[in-house]
Image (cartoon, helix red, strand yellow):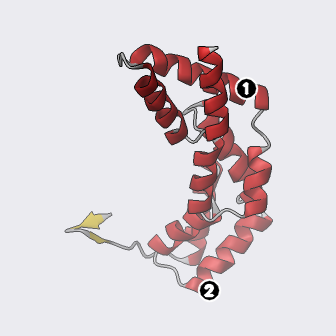
């Protein structure tokens, strides 16, 4: 809803906004932060937004833990993000530390390690660098930028040389 760089607000009644946001939340898991932002786009006041948020939570349309778990599972399985990147993104979405820790526990350690090994193997095959030190550094940087812990990346790279 942009016109000449300005966000145009849609003005909706409380009842219409509530139904619309319920459908939006039912489509996929949403964070409280993004749901509030969407409600403000509807032209609602802070009091109205808070009322709707209470309704959404009480009717189980919004659940921060469920969102964090679904988000972390999805980003790991589909995008192959590491825990550091997932955690940073959840923090950016204003998710509580408790929910973040619980969500990251959902990622199986064996799957996590296997995924990291696969990412490193794929990147190793792609990099054409002749200098072994520079090649390892590039692979290391890549894996860490994907959100994987530096100590895990180092361990796997050491195993490759042994």
* Quarter placement of the N terminus: bottom left
Q: Residue at x 71, y 60 (%)?
A: 62
Measured in 3D between alpha carbons, the distance from the residue under mark 2 to the one under mark 1, in whole angstroms, is 44 Å
Q: Residue at x 77, y 25 (%)?
A: 110
Q: Quadrant of residue 83?
A: top right
Residue bearing mark 1:
111
How far across and how far down the image is residue 27, in percent?
60, 47
| Residue 93 vs residue 157, the one in the foreground | 157
Query: How many marks can you see?
Result: 2
Residue bearing mark 2:
47
* Quarter placement of the C terminus: top right
Q: Is residue 40 visible?
A: yes
Q: Earlier in the sequence, mark 2 or mark 1?
A: 2
- Neighbor class of circle 1 (other Cα within 10 Å; few <14, some 14-19, many 20+) is few
Q: Is residue 28 visible?
A: no
Q: What mark, if any, has residue 18 been given in the picture?
A: none
For this orientation, the residue located farthest to the left is 4
Q: Residue at x 46, y 78 (%)?
A: 43
Please tell me whether residue 146 is drawn above or below residue 36 in the rendered image.
Answer: above
| Residue 78 vs residue 117, the one in the foreground | 117
């Amino acid at each position: 809803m942009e016109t000449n760089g300005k966000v145009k607000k849609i003005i909706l009644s409380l009842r219409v906004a509530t139904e619309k946001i319920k459908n939006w939340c039912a489509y996929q898991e949403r964070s409280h932060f993004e749901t509030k932002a969407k409600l403000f786009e509807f032209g609602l006041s802070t009091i109205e937004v808070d009322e709707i948020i209470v309704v959404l939570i009480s009717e189980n349309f919004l659940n921060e833990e469920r969102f964090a778990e679904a988000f972390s599972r999805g980003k790991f399985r589909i995008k192959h993000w590491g825990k550091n990147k997932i955690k940073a993104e959840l923090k950016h979405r204003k998710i509580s530390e408790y929910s973040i820790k619980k969500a990251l526990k959902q990622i199986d350690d064996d799957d996590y390690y296997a995924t990291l090994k696969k990412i490193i193997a794929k990147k190793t095959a792609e990099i054409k660098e002749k200098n072994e030190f520079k090649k390892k550094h590039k692979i290391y940087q890549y894996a860490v930028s994907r959100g994987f812990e530096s100590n895990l990346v180092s361990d796997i790279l050491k195993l490759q040389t042994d």
